[in-house]
Amino acid sequence: MFDSPLFFLLIHSLLRWLVLLSLLYAILRAFRGLSKGLAFSKTDNSVRHWTATIAHIQLIAGMILYIQSPVTSYFWRNFAEAIRQVNTTFFGLVHISLMLLAIVLITIGSALAKRKQSDPEKFRTMLIWFSVALLIILLAIPWPFSPWATRPYLRTF
């Protein structure tokens, strides 16, 4: 069961929404803390930590799906032909590259915020790094209206 592609697809589907929700929540807490001059609480630190942790779990699930995907397998086996196909190139190269970049930014932002001395610096660091990561994630999502690749908001199995 745990090595089934369907299992990882289900986990991946749930995690993608958790990543977005936790990232939005962390950004909102950072904005609120910075704008109101609040203390960086244990809750803020937990939100920072769990946002990065959820993103890392999603990364693992996404990498497993990427390795098992027939689209990416086709892309790498037939690179010269596949690179000319927008949808295949998006899933074979663009999506994974942007998502990896976003996870790196979340990781760096989380680590930097943890090490900052003052509360405003912690909130500002979290706000900037997590917001840039969210923007990259939003660019890398295969929205139903995207010219590069389309997927429904909620996938059926």
Image (spheres, rainbow, N blue to C red):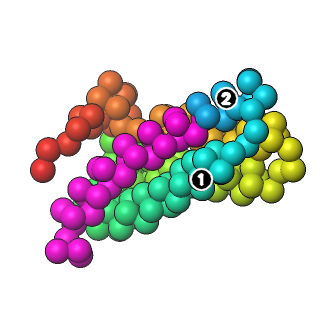
> Does residue 92 appear anywhere in the picture?
yes
10 Å crowding of disc 1: few (<14), some (14-19), many (20+):
few
Residue at the image position 52 percent from the left and 36 percent from the top: 25
Mark 2 and mark 1 in contact (Cβ < 8 Å)? no
What segment is highlighted magenta in the picture?
A: 1-27
Dividing the picture into quadrants, the one containing residue 74 is: bottom left
Please provide percent x and percent y for residue 49: 60, 56
10 Å crowding of disc 2: few (<14), some (14-19), many (20+):
some
Q: Which mark is residue 46?
A: 1
Task: Name the residue nearer the viewer: 117 or 156.
Answer: 117
Residue at the image position 20 percent from the left and 42 percent from the top: 155
Compared to 58, does 156 lie above or below?
above
Indicate the amino acid at tag 1.
Ser
Q: Is residue 15 magenta?
A: yes
Q: Main secondary structure of the magenta part?
A: helix
Indicate the amino acid at tag 2.
Phe
Residue lying farthest left? 157
Please provide percent x and percent y for residue 35: 74, 24
Dividing the picture into quadrants, the one containing residue 146 is: top left
Q: Which mark is residue 143?
A: none
Task: Name the residue nearer the viewer: 156 or 49.
Answer: 49
Helix, strand or loop at mark 2: helix
> Does residue 125 appear anywhere in the picture?
no
Which mark lies nearer to you, 1 or 2?
A: 1
Helix, strand or loop at mark 1: helix
User: What residue sits right under mark 2 in the picture?
Assistant: 31
